[in-house]
Image: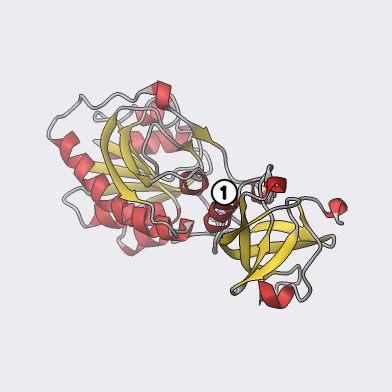
Amino acid sequence: MRVVMFGYQTWGHRTLRALLDSEHEVVLVVTHPKSDHAYERIWSDSVADLAAEHGVETITRNRPDDDELFQRLKEVEPDVIVATNWRTWIPPHIFTLPKRGTLNVHDSLLPAYAGFSPLIWALINDEKEVGVTAHMMDETLDAGDIVLQRAVPVGPRDTTADLFHKTLELFGPITVDGLALIAEGRTEFTKQDRSKASFFHKRAEEDLRIDWTWQADELDRLVRAQCAPYPSAFTFHKGRRLEIVEAEVSQARYGGTPGRIFYREGDGVAVVAGADARRGRNHALLVKRVRTEDGRELGATEYFTHMGGYLTARPEATA
């Protein structure tokens, strides 16, 4: 089949490589311009560079809604469009242009986690598996009929980076396998159960802020979700921003005020967590490594030389 690919970053790069190695002919690539946004610089392998290496025409757009692009799409006469990590709305006159429609590849197990940053949100929410869905695009975001799904388990200490690498391996195969079904003439696929749909927005600064009334296991997942190369979860110590780079749940239970820097346990420092922590039934968040405002990364036992004091959600809440 003649394929046009809309793709961006490493997800699009991996998908394009699989398409170039397949029996299908990639006749055009549409990608976004490079961005200086912090999240856009993560996993930023260039789709445009890979297309150029293989002599494939590339068009760069923030939004694919102009007449010039539409005319070029008509000229190349694609049988199907493949969209992978495309960041803006694709209008109906574009995604319905190919006779076999548009196959979108999304990094979640739809209908759950439609939208942005699905791996981070899934890890924070303690999902037991994550995955990739290839579905036919329609007018509703990530809501089209499911062609294929592939899942991988979430390990007990997995970070978002671990889940990224696990799911990235699925993108090429699920795209090529999905196209094989479409090429066979399949038009009926699995309807999504919209009662099970969930939607998530892009991660922002406020989503990284630690709320010490969360339980320790929730904070542990937040820290693992915001691992490098993503921006770290943060708190404040003595009015200064402090990033939590590594943490885990304490073995012992601790009572007191949420955010209290309490006790050295092993190679970490226990910080009281949980809204009901005063009853002394909660595990603490065992903070192991931190990063200061000036970029220094230190072991928590080195940074917190003297126990006592508080970690707070806002600088003005210091105690």
Q: Secondary structure at mark 1?
A: helix
107 or 58: which is nearer to us?
Answer: 107
- Within-10-Å neighbours for mark 1: few <14, some 14–19, many 20+: many
Q: Residue at x 84, y 60 (%)?
A: 239
Quadrant where the image shows the N terminus: top left
User: x, y (%) of residue 80?
Assistant: 27, 36
254 or 216: which is nearer to us?
Answer: 254
Horizontal arrangement in the rendering, residue 135 relative to residue 220 (left or right): left
The reply to whether residue 1 is in sight is: no
Horizontal arrangement in the rendering, residue 138 relative to residue 230 (left or right): left
User: x, y (%) of residue 224?
Assistant: 53, 58
Give, as a three-letter code, the residue at label 1: Glu
Q: Residue at x 43, y 28 (%)?
A: 197
What is the residue that sits farthest to the left in this orientation? 184
Question: Which quarter of the picture shows residue 180?
Answer: top left
The reply to whether residue 273 is in sight is: yes
Quadrant where the image shows the C terminus: bottom right
User: x, y (%) of residue 17?
Assistant: 29, 58
Where 93 falls versus 217 (above or below)? Answer: above
User: x, y (%) of residue 298?
Assistant: 67, 76
Q: Residue at x 57, y 48 (%)?
A: 218
Horizontal arrangement in the rendering, residue 208 relative to residue 195 (left or right): right
77 or 107: which is nearer to us?
Answer: 107
Residue tagged 1: 218
